[in-house]
Amino acid sequence: MPKFCRVCEKPLSEFMSFGEMPIANSFINIQEKKNQYLYEMLAAFCENCFTFQLLNVPKPKQMFNENYAYLASTSKEMQEHWGDLANKITDEFNFDKKSFIVEIGSNDGIFLKHISEKKISHLGVDASSNVNEIAEAKGVNTLNAFFNSKTASDIVTNFGKADIIFSSNTMHHIEDINEVVKGMDLLLKDDGTIITEDPSLKEMIIKNSYDQIYAEHMYIWSLHSISSLFGRYKMEVYRIENNERHGGCSRYFICRKGKKKIDQTVVEYMQVEKTLKLNNIKTFLNFKKNVSNSKKILRDLLFNFKKNGKKIVGYGAPAKSTTILNYCDIDSSLIEKIFDNSSTKVGKYTPGKSMIPIEHTDSFISYKSDYTLLFAWNHKDEILKKEKNYKNKWIIPIPKIEII
Ligand code: TMP
Ligand code: ZN
């Protein structure tokens, strides 16, 4: 039975299985080990609309609920990143008292907090009630809901249409993505702008950062695929900006067709993606080879250290670590513990087969390990600076397995 693209409904080309996976952000207690939700993580590419996507994803409620473990504000760098964007867009779009901005997937209020401080009308929509409570405590107005066309019409009825619809690291989370864009179409003012920032397919392919892939990241967007998706609703990307957050993200500025001049950045980036053949299945078959090589190198390295009596720990338990641990079959016999500073993860275990205990980063230095695998490799500069008193070696898993 062929599987069909969630964006354009054409048959998909399935190219890789990562084996059995738990839900990436479902850090668990020891007694929950046997009751985990597991799925086979299968990656596919649509040769019609160029969307990279996962098959078999869990139901939204299984991923986004009152136990959602990811808190965006754990990183100082990310706090600054979203603070800068809030300042930039308030200037660029001349926000005033009548402006209204809606964020889809507002998490712990890391972005809207700055908008709220500027006294601009806003609403953060998030399906996880625990993160909404944290955001509300920062003065952010929230709505506990999944964003879809129904939620969008309710927002229009209660608050009016939006000048800006913002989402960061959310467009890749939502299976029924056409419902989201339909909702955006209903909610957006005629001359409004959608700004969405997500991990970039180009960066994933270049860095071989397969740890970007997990059920919550069921799409890895590119300019090609985002343009196909929004094109279905007569909208287009008019500007693109790129940054190194989360291992490489693209920020797309989207308007109704013909409303804004298409920036040169869009023309150039389209060409870059074509040169990298992000519109060709062969690129993904090659990616599959690189990913399985990376698994072999990492396992050989860890087994070798272990054989020589070395103590190995991990640093950072991002959702990404769930993919590395489960795909590479790494458990607590290889990595004794992982240090992380998120209150939602400390005291729990990494999910799936791995079951590695998570402790607070405060006890990292005193634990005296020989090697530390940096799962939060995208925060390398921040973490290495913070942990400058660690005298032993770091293992960096991505983009290239390196020991420093
Ligand atoms: P992220 O890559 O999805 O932002 O997740 C990073 C993880 O690493 C998150 O669980 C928090 C953790 N972390 C630390 O423990 N210490 C740090 O200094 C930073 C930046 C992150
Ligand atoms: Zn498609």
Image: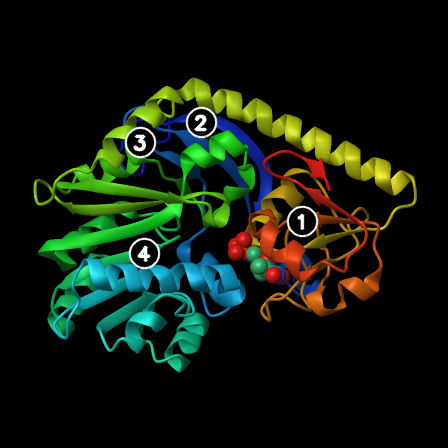
For marks 2 and 1, the one nearer the N-term is: 2
At x 73%, y 60%, the residue is 357
| Closer mark to the observer between disc 3 and disc 1 | 3
The residue wearing badge 4 is 167
Instruction: Give the residue pinned by disc 2.
Output: 14
Q: CA distance from mark 4 to mark 2?
A: 28 Å
- Give the mark nearer the N terminus: 1 vs 4: 4
Q: For residue 35, which quarter of the picture?
A: bottom right
User: Real-space Cα distance between discs 3 and 4?
Assistant: 21 Å
Contact between marks 2 and 1 (CB within 8 A): the answer is: no
SS for callout 3 = helix
The residue shown at (80%, 46%) is: 334
Q: Earlier in the sequence, mark 3 or mark 4?
A: 4
The residue beneath circle 3 is 269
Q: Which mark is residue 223?
A: none
Q: CA distance from mark 2 to mark 1?
A: 30 Å
Residue of label 1: 374
